[in-house]
Amino acid sequence: MLANKNNNLSLFAIVISLVCLLAPQLGQAAATDEILPLRERAAMIDSLIQKRVQQLLPDLMRETNIDMWLLISREYNEDPVLQTLLPATWLSARRTTILVFARDKQGEVTAYAIAPYSVGNLFTKAWDKEAHPSQWQALNALVERYQPKRIGVNRSGSWAHADGLVAGDEQWLLSHLPERYRQALVSAEPLAVGWLERRIPEEIELYPSLVKMAHEIIAQGFSNRVIKVGQTTSEDLVWWFRERVRELKLDTWFHPSVTIQRAKQQDLSGDSVILPGDLLHVDFGITYLRLNTDTQQLAYVLRDGETQAPDYLVKAFNSGNQLQDILTAQFAVGKTGNEVLKAAREHAIAAGLKPTIYSHPIGYHGHGAGTSLGMWDAQQGIAGSGDHPLHLNTAYSIELNNAVFIPEWEREIRIMLEEDAMFDASGVWYLDGRQTALILIEPELSMGGK
């Protein structure tokens, strides 16, 4: 898969490739060099959870008018929200785990765990088996202490993330909770979505380094360090990305994909050999410190004698950046995803583009809870998540494509781009910049090594 040195290529190309490969050794530190050991990651995850509870939950529970929030899960069937609250050393719930957030009359929120074991340092243990032999008795005692008027449970028809109370656990809850409190149960959908979608300052400061890691891995994959033109296939490249993630002790939340757009042919994937003149596309994401990235970028394989991509491809690529700008210009607090989608499409079509927009929140989940801005097969809007308004301090994958007919190729191509961005009081800004030019791959150059 690694190419051999070709002495016929220009010295300039060799020098440029060497600089790219050796940048970390030349003093430009790579983000992947800063990946923390697992023990340090665990400490940071636990610290972030505690800060999020302190900074977000009091206001979120007040805004959503929820006095008590119940999260109930059995081992290996975890509520998606509960998973974001477990200590880093807990890889799943244990037996039945009940987490409770209770808001007092002063608006202070206290976190409790009614579980067989202590749940980290954030949660106060609220089950004394001598006083309350049953876990549900302990829950009822806590509920009686606070006497909440509205008890939120995770039920939702619009977001799977906020629909984590499964039928069996709900049945147990209803069979043990006193009648007056069964009447107080309400959907915690707005609270669960708010918890998942909003980022605290510490996470906003951290997130750019994650996206930089993803960008670095893509740059390595889209290089002659990995690709031997004429031999490497798109599937080889896909599995290189999977192996590289594992080597770095990172995780990925979805299997990467690599597709090839080629003159006079349909899009290619699978074991299609990469050739000069190909336009390569990758969709790739990593998971680190429980946060996710989602990136799509494009590379062009130079033909013999070419030093840059053809002008018609450069122009087509620029239309993708133009569509990104049109979309992000529509972001405003309180606008729904469907409103942003409609306005962006109208502006793009008026500018002569052929847009498809399918951007989404990102954070604890790659396809996160929050405001959806279209889907590839729903360009007229999405009921539910598309009606959700934009909030500040939320992260989005700006995912879209613009279709362009290329006469020289006798076909239409798609400029498919995806970059992670933050929406805050300053507007929309890309967490580690965005791709503004095609990545170029030499037709035969190889530097050897990994």
Image: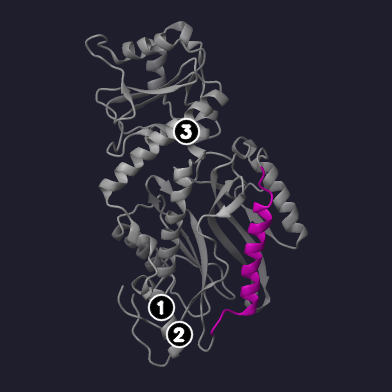
323 part of magenta stretch? yes
Measured in 3D between alpha carbons, the distance from the residue under mark 2 to the one under mark 3, in whole angstroms, is 51 Å
| Type of amino acid at the residue the image marks with label 3 | Gln
Look at the picture and state if 409 lies above or below 289: below
- Tell me: residue 379, above or below residue 419: above
- Colouring used for the render: one colour
Instruction: Judge the density around disc 1: few (<14), some (14-19), many (≥20) Cα neighbours within 10 Å.
Output: few
- Judging from the image, what secondary structure is the residue with disc 1 in? helix
Query: The C terminus lies in which quarter of the figure?
Result: bottom left
Residue 285 in view here? no
The mark nearer the N terminus, 2 or 3, is: 2
* Residue receiving disc 2: 13
Which quarter of the figure has residue 351? bottom right
Rounded to the nearest angstrom, the CA distance separating label 1 from label 2 is: 10 Å
Mark 1 or mark 2, whichever is nearer to me: 1
Which residue bears the numbered disc 1? 19
Mark with earlier residue (3, 1): 1
Residue identifier under label 3: 55
**Type of amino acid under label 1:** Val
Instruction: Say left or right for 12 vs 122.
Output: right
Q: Is residue 30 above or below residue 395?
A: below
Taking the magenta stretch, the answer to whether it contains residue 276 is no
Query: Which is more toward the observer, 395 or 231?
Result: 395
Report, in whole angstroms, how far the alpha carbon at label 3 lies from the one at label 1.
44 Å
Depth order, front residue of 277/4? 4
